[in-house]
């Protein structure tokens, strides 16, 4: 091999090595952005890619000969049952987040936090759509202080919807004033009910009382449960948890039954109360055959109650406890039937629906659907299938949620105000002082120069402790509160970063030839004019570079801001720290927050890269 | 300006002799002196191993942390700078991309790496254990002796682009004719590197070492964000001086001990800078 070719080969190899290094170097950043688009369950289970998501089944119903299966991520599928099992015919997706479903004759209503309320016709096409913006208008008219942004997107398990012949009722869980949306099907008029309009407490779930033909609803909230007269649109029963023998806390599951009864599930026990009086009638537990672990779902089929438990399916006569003919049925092999997809997260039985006598559909946590049929007094797991709505799931929503759960706009505003102020102050003051240091002789110049350097060696906390105490003192004695204000922070940062900026700029000013200035003076400029229109433009690259450097440094400052700000004046680092403390395991949101905090400086860097690089290196090389 | 800086400093030194707590904050400078004499805070901090001030651990950790980070960033930076100091396609892009970690705010670095170091779901353990099978069991990164490495590696990652940038500028300032002259004299690549490149970069080294010392000894954000979601105790293997002072002052509200530690830190830092100046004085004035 000739020496020339060898050299070229080495060159190519080195270039390749450079780009490998570049890539490896970027990996953590890419991982941060990637994880900000993932689901937290995927992150917590150590899944690296973005998986095909199958959400938990939260709606099962029969529609003629077919079965409808809906999932909480907005997937709906129609299944046909034949001898060989179930075959999916159709799968659609109507919203990404925490959808609820309600059957309305041949139609279907879906409610999701992002797509709003939608009516799907028999072929599962959208026939009517009322998005959250429309709902918002209705709320704004009635409750101007209730922005729809306060809907807790990631916390709307309680969100549910019920359709009657004339109305659609939807319960929405919100940060403030959770309440009930009522849509009049004929006129399209939307009304909103919450604490301000006569509901005793906030509710976030609506259930229809069976056999009432859509007249009677049950509304559940964290304070208690209500009866709702759907015709008159008013509350007719009100009970708070802990009163009249009701459970002390909101039970995990609730289901209105026939004969003025309502069932509450807590763990592996069921309490049946009277709806009107709230009195406890009886309870069902292991004595009645409920010994299959935690109850995750329940459904009513004529006089039988079906319980989907962690380890099986149990059917109990509804009147059990009054009479003694309780009947527990165990499904053989249900557990294995429900673990079709072993890699999926949490393949637990989550939904059970009774179709007709002895025919059950069981929904799993990972989009599994199992048909269970009664045969010869025993339940046998039959056809099983998966929801076809599995799709790659990228969570742009993390950013939206971040914005909603966190006053990120405030943090951003504070950070921008503080950083920009400090940057401008530092640029102006340091230009003047740096120029003076570089050009003029004055008494104590040497000491001044060295003390500027010395300030950089003193740890910041050395100031923080005394200043914190001093500020507290000032606040106590004079009532002027410095802690918790933006200007206090600006003052401190300026004091801290101006000396450093002076030191950098001194070099830039010293590098400008004296002749330039002298020529200006000879031409008749005043000294200030010479400084302003000759020296400053010549030193501009350095001034800009040091200004940006100050901006980036202040953007990065956590310790001072931590102690000297309050909820309204927090900067981004403080906000993120608080956020990380409050949402300990929400890594998806945390990574979204980290990405958002990085983005502004990233953009600034891109725009100003030339200045930053030349400014920084000039200081280093020229000394 | 000097008033803003030196008055609090004197105040801080004064505080370090007092038993100043949150409970007697209103006494201000009239706070009582510690029970074990006027130097009580210093005795506690330096001598009493039973007191949970944690200064000695913090000093040891900070020493290794600053040393290894400064070394690591310099070496990596030199490698990066030498790779970039050639003519090839996409050089500007490579430089920009290499600078990226340096733009990430340090609190984000702490948060991000704290997430990456998670034992079960962290990407580091997934790569080491599930993909490469290098370790038989997923190690604990944020607990025990590993914590020191868990804070060193992200810091190197964050700061090496800065070293690279400085060294690259330094390299580009070395006149090419020196190398050509050396080639004529028969010097090999290694010889040129040792005899020309390294010595001529001395001014850059001096700046990098000074920066490395100041930045790393005063490092706070990365550690505080990595442990306990922004408020945790890093443990005795990951605690740095700054986090120790902060914890003592603003989480245990014991300002006296905190101030005493700050004073010691300040004196040590000034001593270090004087040593640095002695060593590099020639290089600084030469250019």
Image: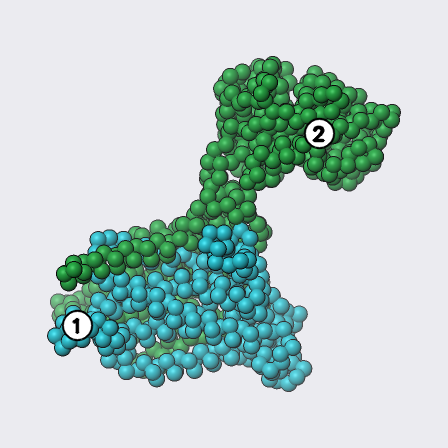
Chain colours: A green, B cyan
Instruction: Name the side, left or right, on which A94 lies relative to B183.
Output: right
Q: Answer yes or no: do the residues labelled 2 and 1 have beta carbons within 8 Å? A: no
Which residue is at the front of the view, A65 or A454?
A65
Q: Can residue A165 be spotted in the picture?
A: yes
* Residue A610 position within the rendered picture, expressed as x and y whole percent measured from the top left: 26, 57
User: Marks 2 and 1, how far apart in space?
Assistant: 84 Å
Residue pushed farthest front?
Answer: A1
Q: Is residue B102 above or below residue B175?
A: above
* Residue B131 position within the rendered picture, expressed as x and y whole percent measured from the top left: 46, 51
Q: Quadrant of residue B184?
A: bottom left
Q: Quadrant of residue B70?
A: bottom left
Residue pushed farthest right?
Answer: A323
Q: Residue at x 63, y 36 (%)?
A: A348
Q: Can residue A430 be spotted in the picture?
A: no
Name the element at disc 2: strand
Q: Residue at x 54, y 68 (%)?
A: B145
Q: Residue at x 39, y 68 (%)?
A: B72
**Residue B179, numbered label:** 1
The C terminus of chain A lies in which quarter of the figure?
bottom left
Which residue is at the front of the view, A429 or A74?
A74
Q: Residues within 10 Å of mark 2 (few under 14, many from 20)?
A: some
> Badge 2 sits on which subunit?
A
Question: Viewer-nearest of labels 2 and 1?
Answer: 2
Which residue is at the front of the view, A381 or A505?
A381
Name the element at disc 1: helix
């Amino acid at each position: 091999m000739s020496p020339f070719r060898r050299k070229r080969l080495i060159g190519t190899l080195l270039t390749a090595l450079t780009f490998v290094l570049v890539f490896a170097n970027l990996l953590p950043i890419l991982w941060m952005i990637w994880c900000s688009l993932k689901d937290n369950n995927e992150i917590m289970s150590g899944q690296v890619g973005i998986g095909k998501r199958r959400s938990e089944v939260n709606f099962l119903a029969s529609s003629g000969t077919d079965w409808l299966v809906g999932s909480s991520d907005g997937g709906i599928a129609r299944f046909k049952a034949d001898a060989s099992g179930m075959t999916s015919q159709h799968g659609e997706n109507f919203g990404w987040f925490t959808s609820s479903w309600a059957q309305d004759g041949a139609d279907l209503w879906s409610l999701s936090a992002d797509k709003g309320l939608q009516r799907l016709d028999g072929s599962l096409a959208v026939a009517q759509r009322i998005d959250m913006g429309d709902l918002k208008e209705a709320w704004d008219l009635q409750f101007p202080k209730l922005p729809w942004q306060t809907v807790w997107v990631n916390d709307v398990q309680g969100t549910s919807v019920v359709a009657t012949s004339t109305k659609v009722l939807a319960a929405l869980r919100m940060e403030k004033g959770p309440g009930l949306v009522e849509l009049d099907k004929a006129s399209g008029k939307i009304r909103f009910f919450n604490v301000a309009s006569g509901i005793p407490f906030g509710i976030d779930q609506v259930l229809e009382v069976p056999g009432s033909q859509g007249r009677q609803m049950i509304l559940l909230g964290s304070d208690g449960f209500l009866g709702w007269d759907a015709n008159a649109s008013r509350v007719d029963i009100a009970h708070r948890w802990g009163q009249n023998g009701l459970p002390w806390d909101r039970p995990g599951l609730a289901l209105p039954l026939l004969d003025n009864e309502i069932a509450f599930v807590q763990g592996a026990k069921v309490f049946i109360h009277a709806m009107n009086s709230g009195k406890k009638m009886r309870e069902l537990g292991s004595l009645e055959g409920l010994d299959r672990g935690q109850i995750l779902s329940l459904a009513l089929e004529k006089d039988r109650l079906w319980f989907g438990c962690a380890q099986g399916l149990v059917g109990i006569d509804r009147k059990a406890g009054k009479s003694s003919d309780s009947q527990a049925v165990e499904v053989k092999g249900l557990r294995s039937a429900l673990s079709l997809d072993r890699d999926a997260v949490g393949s637990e039985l989550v939904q059970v629906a009774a179709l007709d006598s002895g025919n059950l559909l069981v929904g799993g946590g990972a989009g599994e659907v199992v048909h269970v049929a009664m045969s010869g007094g025993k339940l046998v797991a039959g056809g099983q299938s998966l929801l076809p709505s599995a799709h790659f799931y990228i969570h742009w929503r993390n950013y939206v949620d971040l914005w909603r759960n966190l006053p990120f706009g405030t943090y951003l505003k504070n950070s921008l105000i503080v950083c920009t102020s400090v940057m401008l102050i530092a640029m102006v003051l340091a230009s003047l002082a740096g120029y003076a240091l570089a050009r003029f002789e004055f008494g104590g110049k040497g000491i001044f120069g060295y003390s500027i350097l010395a300030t950089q060696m003193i740890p910041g906390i050395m100031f923080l402790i005394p200043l914190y105490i001093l500020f507290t003192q000032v606040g106590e004695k004079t009532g002027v509160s410095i802690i918790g204000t933006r200007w206090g922070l600006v003052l401190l940062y300026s004091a801290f970063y101006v000396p450093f900026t002076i030191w950098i700029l001194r070099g830039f000013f010293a590098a400008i030839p004296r002749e330039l200035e002298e020529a200006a003076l000879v031409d008749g400029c005043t000294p200030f004019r010479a400084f302003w229109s000759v020296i400053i433009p010549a030193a501009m690259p350095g001034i800009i570079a040091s200004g940006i450097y100050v901006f980036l440094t202040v953007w990065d400052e956590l310790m001072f801001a931590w102690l000297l700000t309050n909820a309204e004046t927090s900067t981004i680092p403080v906000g993120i720290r608080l956020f990380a403390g409050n949402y300990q395991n929400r890594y998806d949101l945390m990574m979204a927050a980290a990405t958002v905090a990085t983005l502004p400086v990233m953009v600034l860097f891109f725009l100003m890269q030339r200045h930053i690089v030349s400014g920084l290196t000039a200081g280093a090389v020229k000394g | 300006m000097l008033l803003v800086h030196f008055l609090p400093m004197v105040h801080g030194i004064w505080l370090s002799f007092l038993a100043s707590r949150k409970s007697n904050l209103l006494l201000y400078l009239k706070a009582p002196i510690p029970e074990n004499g006027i130097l009580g805070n210093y005795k506690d901090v330096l001598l009493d191993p039973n007191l949970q001030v944690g200064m000695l651990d913090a000093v040891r950790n900070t020493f290794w942390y600053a040393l290894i980070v400064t070394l690591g960033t310099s070496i990596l930076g030199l490698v990066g700078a030498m790779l970039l100091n050639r003519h090839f396609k996409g050089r500007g892009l490579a430089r920009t991309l290499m600078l990226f970690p340096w733009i990430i705010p340090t609190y984000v670095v702490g948060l991000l790496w704290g997430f990456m170091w998670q034992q079960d779901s962290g990407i580091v353990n997934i790569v080491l254990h599930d993909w490469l099978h290098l370790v038989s069991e997923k190690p604990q990164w944020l607990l025990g002796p590993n914590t020191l490495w868990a804070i060193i590696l992200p810091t190197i990652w964050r700061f090496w682009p800065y070293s690279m940038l400085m060294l690259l500028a330094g390299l580009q300032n070395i006149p090419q004719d020196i190398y050509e002259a050396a080639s004529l004299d028969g010097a090999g690549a290694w010889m040129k590197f040792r005899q020309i490149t390294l010595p001529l970069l001395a001014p850059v080294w001096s700046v990098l070492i000074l920066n490395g010392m100041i930045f790393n000894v005063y490092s706070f954000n990365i550690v505080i964000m990595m442990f306990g979601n922004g408020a945790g105790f890093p443990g005795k293997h990951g605690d740095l001086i700054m986090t120790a002072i902060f914890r003592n002052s603003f989480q245990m509200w014991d300002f006296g001990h905190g101030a005493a530690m700050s004073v010691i830190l300040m004196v040590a830092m000034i001593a270090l800078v004087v040593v640095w100046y002695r060593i590099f004085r020639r290089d600084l004035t030469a250019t």
